[in-house]
Image (tube, rainbow, N blue to C red):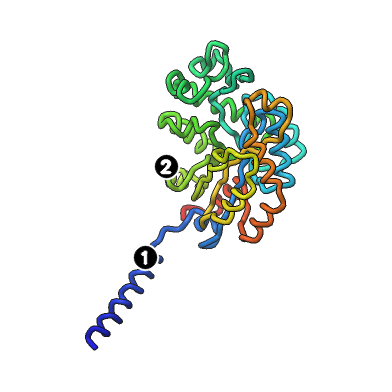
Amino acid sequence: MKRRGFLIQFLAFLLIATSAAFAQAPKTYAERLGWQAGDRILIIHSDDAGMSLASNRGTIEALEFGLVTSTSMMMPTPWVAGFARYLKDHPDTDVGLHLTMTSEWDDYRWAPVAGKPTVPTLADKQGCLWDGNELVYQHASADDVEEEIRAQVDRALAMDIKVSHLDSHMGTLFYNPALFERFKKVAIEKQIPLLMMAEHPAAEEVWKAGLPVIDHLHTDSYDWKTTDKKQQYIAAVRNLKPGITEMIVHSTKPDDVIGVITGGRDHLYADYSALTDPEVKKVAEEEKIILTTWRELKDRRDKAGQN
């Protein structure tokens, strides 16, 4: 009888401890933005708008006919005007800036928006942005990087683009602490959300500054080096965790030029194909995934206050 009584007491203790643990579990940022515990919120985000005609076409079709809910533009690149014209006719598009500090292709390059005389440490001898992150980190000053961030934002605003968020092409502004500080500084000053994940040390600082934070970032699609990604996307959607996830994709529609620029991007054509596939969309509906945008995150953050 004593053993039975001890067992009952032990089970009661476990129940109380487990309940306390659940009660003390921190809320997801989704909950802090007004969604329910357990909700799975998803931004499917197509990078590289403005980089090429193929990028523009793939992104537009994935926005209009597929699962893509958000995109971001590379302001120094040649096809920005074409995408800006699309935005003029579709002003509700959730579009941010894919802040670009590199020009990485051999025969298809671009210069800093601010110009080499203004940001000399950001440009190579051709006057183009450096070919890769390591060269940026070796040569670029934080002051010049901030100047270029501001120039890219200003160009977008001058083109009447409603900038919903900021992220970073090739992750350049995330991997270097000094450059990240300038990135964060401009975002907070202008109250434009930046791509900020819960695990980042600056997450609460960004939240308290009035900007939204997401819970998870999914970047696996770039590593799926295959021409058929439908099953990978279906699995990724089914396996989403509670909270807000941004899934980064590159919805590029094939044409005769993009392969010359990049040396072949078949695995990115597969993003376009999968994300406009009705079966993938059906799975998202079956899983009760809530699709959202950065614009909605900012609206919810404005209403959330300091919770």
Q: Amino acid at mark 2?
A: Ala
Q: Residue furthest right?
A: 89
Q: Which residue is disc 1 drawn over?
A: 21
Residue at x 51% of width, y 36% of height? 189
| 148 shown above or below 40 | above
Q: Earlier in the sequence, mark 2 or mark 1?
A: 1
Q: Quadrant of the N terminus?
A: bottom left
Near mark 2 (Cα within 10 A), the count class, few <14, some 14-19 or many ≥20, is some
Residue at x 38% of width, y 63% of height? 24
Residue at x 54% of width, y 62% of height? 36
**Would residue 185 be seen by someone viewing this image from the given angle?**
no
Residue 207: x percent and y percent? Answer: 47, 47
Residue at x 53% of width, y 21% of height? 131
Q: Secondary structure at mark 1?
A: helix
Q: Amino acid at mark 1?
A: Ala
Q: Residue furthest left?
A: 2
Q: Could you say which is closer to the camera, residue 53 or residue 207?
A: 53
Horizontal side of residue 11 vs 268, given as left or right: left
Q: Secondary structure at mark 2?
A: loop
**Would residue 81 be seen by someone viewing this image from the given angle?**
yes
Which dot marks residue 202? 2
Q: Residue furthest bottom?
A: 1
Horizontal side of residue 273 vs 176, given as left or right: right
Near mark 1 (Cα within 10 A), the count class, few <14, some 14-19 or many ≥20, is few
Horizontal side of residue 7 vs 250, given as left or right: left
Question: Image quadrant of residue 89?
Answer: top right
